[in-house]
Image: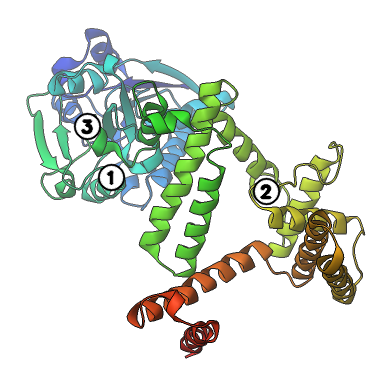
Amino acid sequence: MHVITIIGLGAGSLDQLSIGVYRKLKDAPKIVARTDQHPVVAELRAEGIEMSGFDYIYEKHDAFQDVYAEIVDELVKMSQKKPITYVVPGHPLVAEMTVQKLIEKEREGAVKLDIVGGNSFLDPIFNALRIDPIEGFQLLDGTDLKRDELQMTEHILIGQVYDAFIASDVKLTLMEKYAYDYPVTVVTAAGSADEKLTTVPLFELDRATEVNNLTTVYVPPTVDREQRFKDWSTFREIIAILRSDEGCPWDREQTHESLKRYLIEEAHELLEAIDDEDDEGIIEELGDVLLQVFLHAQIGEDNGYFTMEDVLESVSDKMVRRHPHVFGDQSVENANEVLQNWQAIKQSEKQQLASLLKGQERHTSSLLTSFNFQKEAAKVGFDWPSIEGAFEKLQEEWKEFQEEVESGSKEAQLNELGDVLFTIVNVARFLKLSPEEAMIHANQKFKRRFGFVERSVKEGRGSFQDYTLDELEAFWQQAKGRERE
């Protein structure tokens, strides 16, 4: 195989090339350009330097990845016959996917490369925009831009914005985090005589100016915190400020224990919004639940026990470990197999625990704790063979509770009431019903019906003391009737 010499043509005109690079081009026996759409290519040809190009490959494919793959394959084939000089815009190692793919081929032993420098477009871009990269900047690929890559506090340069279609995709991705009218600058042919800077509101990015293969989109850092409310790091920053010495006295006083009731309340309000199919309500309540998560993580960090990164690592590790059919080489046929694998992996993780019940406590809900205890015990055969056994046990416990109510102590009554509730949870488990959800619905139903009773009293005689229990019960029955209707 022969060597492929890769040369960068810089960001603008022929004058920007070094003497050494220019001489190499003059002496090269065979030159191939990734694209003819670069001013230096036309200038070199005007000086009598012959070169072919791969623009025809762009016309064959809809996806850039396919274009790059075919260009690399063609270059490998050419290098089997003779030495090749491959020229690319800018610097070969800056935002040049074909070169990265050639480097992969080199590691596999398929080609030999000699990468010669070249001026990247970054220096003239920094000069044109008057920005200092030490402040922090990102260089991203417009053909594969992802929302979660965007660091809103840094200078963002988006290259490879070849045409209006890519510009449109870039715009839509940016609008997932930035305001629709956030100012962005389109930089074309930076450092050349044709250099042009056009600043437009984000929503006009794909139609306000012409873009080409020398176009870079610049997104300035967001200075105001209010402009970064869609950014995870901003929310974390807000929580840290609230918990700081200069923050909120109430937030500073909170502990894991003091916040437990708020997490329960927010979870219930989220469930209510889900039941109501209220998208706006779900957004708000998910935010409230997320607030609780971040507060607990910040408390952990303030106390020096753990950080949000520990939380993320733990749950990410669990998701990857328990989804081998997604992140590994295991295969599944359906959702039932997924659940079976999940339980098997979960069980193998628990074999090192002292008890099957360890880790099943839910201190915020005794109903869920009972449900989890019984579910784990059932997995090893400690269970009634059918629901009839659970019903018989419920009748037995109910009778014992009644006996204690008639003649027992408060402690005994409390003990027997617990047995009744525990057995009811067991019945719910057999029926695959959530006792926690059942109680939530029961509480909501009582609140709704009692609200009707309150309104009826207020619209009537005005006070509960003015009604008999039978009259109040009549209002309750009316509320039930309205729900049935």
Q: Amino acid at mark 1?
A: Val
Q: Secondary structure at mark 1?
A: helix
Q: Position of residue 28 (x, y in %)?
A: 32, 19
Residue 170 is marked as: 1
Badge 2 density bin: few <14, some 14–19, many ≥20, Cα 10 Å? some
Instruction: Indicate the amino acid at tag 3.
Output: Asp
Mark closer to the observer (2, 3): 3
Q: Say if 400 sits above or below 297 in the image.
A: below
What's under tag 2, amino acid-wise? His
Q: Residue at x 24, y 50 (%)?
A: 168
Q: Residue at x 33, y 20 (%)?
A: 7
Q: Nearer the viewer, residue 51 or 189?
A: 189
For label 1, the crowd category at 10 Å Cα-Cα, with few meaning under 14, some 14 to 19 and many 20 or more, is: many
Q: Is residue 142 left or right of residue 213?
A: right
- The spot of residue 3 in percent (x, y) is 46, 20
Q: Earlier in the sequence, mark 2 or mark 3?
A: 3
Q: Which mark is residue 340?
A: none
* Mark 2 vs mark 3, CA separation in Å: 40 Å
- Binning the other alpha carbons within 10 Å of mark 3 as few (below 14), some (14 to 19) or many (20 upward) gives few
Badge 2 is on which residue? 323
Q: Position of residue 19 (x, y in %)?
A: 22, 8
Residues 297 and 449: in front is 449
Marks 3 and 1, Cα distance to the nearest angstrom?
Answer: 22 Å
Which circle, 3 or 1, is nearer the viewer?
3
Look at 10% across and 47% down and name the residue there: 208
Residue 316: image quadrant is top right
Which is nearer the N-term, disc 3 or disc 1? 1
| Residue 105 visible, this orientation | no
Find disc 3 in the rendering and name its residue.
Answer: 224
